Amino acid sequence: VTGDDAPEEALLERAREGDAAAFSKLAARHRDALLRAAWAVLGNEEDALDATQEALLRAYRHLATFDGRSSFVTWARKIATNCSLNRLEQKKRDRAGALPDDDVVADRRDQDAALERDEERALVRRAIDELPPAQRAAVLLRDVEGLSYEEIAEALSIPKGTVMSRICYGRKTLKEKLSRLLARSLP
Amino acid sequence: MTCEELEPLVSALVDGELDAEDTALVRGHLATCASCRALEEELAATSALVQRHAPRPKVNVVAWARFEKALKREPRRVKRGGWEGLLGAAALVVVTWGLGAFLAFGDPPIVAAWERRVLPLLKYEDPATAFVKLPPCPKDLEGVKNAGLARDLTPAQLRALERDGLVQVPGTGESLGAFYERDGALVTADAALLVWGGAVSRAVIDVERSLLAPELEETLADLDVALRHFEEKRGLEASARLARRTLDVARALEGAVSADAAVQNDVERALRGVGVSRSEVLDREIDWSRFTPRGPLRELPGHFRAVVWLGEAAFRLDEEHPDELRAACLVALGLARESRTLRRFADFDDAASLIHGPQDDLGGLEVLQVVRSAIGDSVRPELVGRPEALAPLARHAREIARSARAGALAEGGPRFRLVGDTRSLEEVVLTELSSSKLPGRPRPTSLDLLAALGSQPARAVAGADGAEGYVNALEKLTSLLEDVTKVPRAAARAGSGVERAKLFAVTKLLETPPRGVPSVMETQAYSDRLLLAGLAALDMPEPGPERGELTVDPRAALPALEPLPGFYARLAHGARRLALGLDATSPSASRATARLQRVSELLQGLADASREVLEGHPLSKDSRLALQSFASAASVYAPASAFACEDVHVLLKADGTREWLERANGPLDRLYMVVPGESGLRLAVGAAVSAREVISPRPLSAADVARAPRTDPAWASQIVR
């Protein structure tokens, strides 16, 4: 049974035997989760889509090494974050010769104008965009994906203590940038 | 531990990630430390904001289709440490959504790959505050102060008013033409569209200039180097020269100098832009009139002509034309020398496929695949020149074309086209609905475009002449255009740069209807208006000159305003979206970004002023300023006097007198709306525009006017639903 509602194990088994269609079905179930994880690291959709594709192809090629100790999505997510981190490194190297980006700090006037138009969402997204990638990845994997610190440590190949500090400093940075929003939402 | 040292633990407490011991420690501290308690609250609130608003992107259908295609290319069994291991430390990037090519080419191995760069997908939700929030309308208009105004409304219209708080009826009031004759200064929806379109048009040209034109220029320069290198190799001279000359024409059109007489002759023909004659370089007939830039593209004539030329330059991939077949392979190999060249080229190459659907032409990447299939992964250009390579190359070209194009191959076999066809969306539609394809049909119009984009009212009007095959042709176009306009990433990639940005603007405007918008705002007629706005960006006549900062004369009389708050607000939002998109992808287009932001503010000012007018409040200072500024904005962004622009047709009679035809189908419509006033609900009456455009196959005559229906209840009911 490898229909759309086939159990994950059945799809996995077929995919291991080289059934690309079964793998495709399996991948389709988790593609958005992988994309979100890649996005968390890379911060933009274009790169994240490419990293997701790369990760899925790698997962397919190396399916024989998947031992089933974790769930498929956990395993594939780790590949996706790895691919994304590699891409990030590559981009850094590509940019090394270029001038650094201007330090973008949300302008106070911007905040006022944005608040007037009730664009809370835009403001939050911009603040997330501006986080250092390491912090962004940890924060989003926690707050969006709901992963435990342990799972984040595994996905990003960093110690659990580092996860804790990255989330904390990421949130603190966000808190500064969103101070006016927070002032409104807090008593 | 100091407060600072405890911070990560406080954050982890928010996440419930502390063990019992640490939890007790942190809670103990919080009980005595107000600043850490505040921090805990703030971190929790921050986390909540992230949970609520962080983007949750989804893999779209186009990307998924590409993945599935890539998956199919994967061998069933892959040896551990396969090609990935071969790349070594010198490798550049790896696989992408497209076709990764690995070629041992001359000295160091090259991994060819690319990233796509398109305008970003911005997920907007229009702030509900930008729209008039209509209060629920009381049944039978009870408690509505000047309900007497509504006594002429039909029961159906009254029901619509109860349901939507808004009803539009064919008016009986003063005609707009008379208003123009008398007062002359009126800010209308059409004026806003012109200003918006002007600003978008300028922005689009800026993107073309700052992003696409330099990229094409660099790509061609890179290819030139590669091809000169090939010309020195035995057996490749003739085909490398053909490829280089083809590129040289494009480069010369962009301003590079060429001493080659054949190149010069073709360049001169392209610059003259008239007639059909034989191209010396391509050795075939070319319609040179296509090389004349129109509209705002006149500002980038060299780039425009180069792109058109590359669209014409197709090489035949068969054994009967060995030089063309080899030239195609050499161009593909030239592209693969540098991953950035290939990436840039892939972007251009990709652009047309979505909008044009399956075609026989292979792109540069597919030709690379041909070379690889025929020769193997270790490609040296000399191998392409060997006589025995010809047959496998031609065979694989046929096979790949057949599999990529679902089997069907046109007569003459596959071809390699340097840059996908650059016809605009309009051209596609207008060609398909032209009299050559649908005999007996008059020249297609913008209404056909709207119809093809799925507008039912436009379809009803445009299809009224009953030309045979019109409905079928329209169905086909509609599904094609739906593919283009419903997938924002695809839309952002489709067509030329201008087309790309325009589609981007339009699809962004038409995306998910914003929350909190009165239901009547979602009507087809409303969407049509927005589409027209997008289209105006390209169809506009000459954009006005730059005149620096706008000036406002505070003593000038305020122009009258057609009060359409939602309409102006949505346009304002569209301008702002485009500004954000430009800002993110094309920082060098900062002037355009600033211009769009300025226009957005002006339009928002009109929206606010409209609301004040409809609600009976005196105009605020900001609204007055917006109205005053609008006149000067109009003269900067749009043709002069656009601020008093409306679709009014004027008939010049034989005796020299003029007759106002309004919109050729009756007087200005009126809008009834229930608005909250200081002391309860009021019924407001205002002017509204109809989205109807009546198309006449010939200049309007007095007889046409006499035949035209004076009112059109069917149309009104479409708007009201």
Image: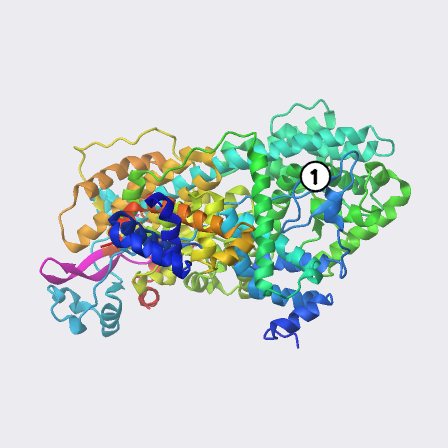
Which residue was labeled with disc 1?
A: B89
In x, y percent, where is residue A176?
33, 43
Q: Is residue B263 left or right of residue B423?
A: right
Residue plotted at (30% across, 46% down): A179
Q: Quadrant of the C terminus of chain B?
A: bottom left
Segment colored magenta: B658-686
Residue plotted at (69% across, 26% down): B264
In x, y percent, where is residue B318?
82, 48
As drawn, the residue found furthest toward the bottom would be A1
Q: Is residue B478 left or right of residue A12?
A: left
Secondary structure that dominates the magenta span? strand
Residue plotted at (80% across, 35% down): B239
As drawn, the residue found furthest toward the left would be B679
Within the magenta stretch, is there residue A100?
A: no
Q: Tag 1's secondary structure?
A: loop
Q: Which amino acid type is marked by label 1?
A: Ala
Q: What chain does mark 1 sit on?
A: B
Q: Residues within 10 Å of mark 1 (few under 14, many from 20)?
A: few
Within the magenta stretch, is there residue B671?
A: yes
Q: Is residue B58 left or right of residue B173?
A: right
The one of B400 and A81 positioned closer to us in this rendering: A81
Residue plotted at (63% across, 41% down): B343
